[in-house]
Amino acid sequence: MSKFKLSLTGLPKPVKIVFWLLLVAFAYALPLLELPLITTPGVDFGGVLFVVTMYMLVALGLNIVVGYAGLLDLGYVGFYAVGAYTAAILTSFHANWPLLFALPIAVLASTISGVLLGAPTLRVRGDYLAIVTLGFGEIIRLVAVNTEWLGEAKGISNIARPPSLGGTDGLFEIPHLYWGDGTVLLDTQDTTKFLVFGVLDQIPYYWLGLTVVIIILFADVLIKNSRVGRAWEATREDEDAAELMGVPTFRFKLLAFATGAFIGGLAGALYASRQNFINPQSFLLLFSILFLAAVVVGGQGNRWGVLVGAALVAYLPQRFREFDDFRVLVFGLALVVLATLRPEGLFPPKRTVRAKHLEQELEVLEEGGAEGEEGARV
């Protein structure tokens, strides 16, 4: 990864722009290409890719909380649920708002929930914060189960979809590729209506999710390189030292929590719209664990790493769905192997790599010093 990044950094700027544009174009065209080794047999590939984008979105939000600010959040699914339920209530259960009007309210509600949770709890650290956030995620689910106003265990259906361009027929149709025996053809019988958000074809949802991921990615780059990003980094490395240097750590931790909740709520609202139905079973604690696994697998603190981690966590179980229950076992074993061989994640940030090398050098120096003292005594 570092070699690839170095070679990419050394390219002329126009070449880099073309490279990124081609990469983005490939990402948008991926569900239409029907690549044999990548498509998911037995599962709608567009739907799987949409889930991948939602995991990427959630991983970017959780990476701000865990990777940048160093706050262990085990209840991130709570913000995801707040965004989903707010969109569901406003577009179906208690009102008939269009989704585009409900989305800002859903994001605002999840952000406020992040502030309300963080204000009294961010004064504790480490394991205590993990326990509090774990309880928050479970409380949100239990409230949904026991509150008639939220549909109880039955859930909420008929959640609004995004507006389609050109009505149900769309503006135009895009054919998929067909991979025959050594030939690649355009399949005019298998097409996708451009930005028509229906039930059968999930590819427009994937395009929407990918667009939102790219927008959040740009915002992530800007905020990480700003004064706020540096304050988060200082707080994560040594909160007491940062406080002594004049950084209002509590304020920046609360900002990280609210920003993460903002992105989590946005992902939840988009997920609810695509599903058209949600209930409390859609927001189990398992999802918090998977979200955190995506960040840890990719390398917490590295935005590109967490994107790869999210893609792997969301895609692999669907790709190997034919193995039924064994896929969960294999997935767990893969995580154990990864934790053993790459405890910093697949693509740890530079500072983590540098810190590890420095730690190894110090250990070598200490061992050398101890051997020298023993030799002197002899």
Image (cartoon, rainbow, N blue to C red):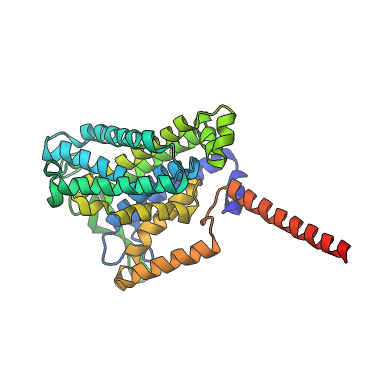
Q: Position of residue 155 (x, y in %)?
A: 15, 49
- Evaluate whether residue 371 shows in this view: yes
Q: Quadrant of the C terminus?
A: bottom right
Whole-percent x, y for residue 320 in the image: 34, 68
**Residue 68, placed above or below residue 370:** above
Q: Residue at x 51, y 57 (%)?
A: 346
Question: Is 33 located above or below residue 161 in the figure?
Answer: below
In the displayed structure, 48 sits above or below 72; it is below
Farthest residue, direction top: 246
Q: Which residue is drawn at the image coordinates 32% and 48% (left, top)?
A: 135
Quarter of the image for residue 208 reads: top left
* Extreme residue in the front direction: 377
Q: Position of residue 309 (x, y in %)?
A: 44, 55
- The answer to whether 33 appears left or right of 163 in the picture is right
Where's residue 265, x and y in %? Answer: 30, 40
Q: Nearer the viewer, residue 376 or 169?
A: 376
Q: Can you say whether 32 is above or below 158 in the image?
A: below
Tell me what residue is drawn at x 19 percent, y 54 percent: 200
Q: Nearer the viewer, residue 103 or 191?
A: 103
Q: Is residue 173 left or right of residue 367?
A: left
Residue 180 appears left or right of 147? right
Does the rendering let one see residue 207?
Answer: no
- Residue located 26% across and 63% down the image: 43
- Give whichever of 355, 251 is nearer the camera: 251
Where does the N terminus fall, quadrant-wise? bottom right
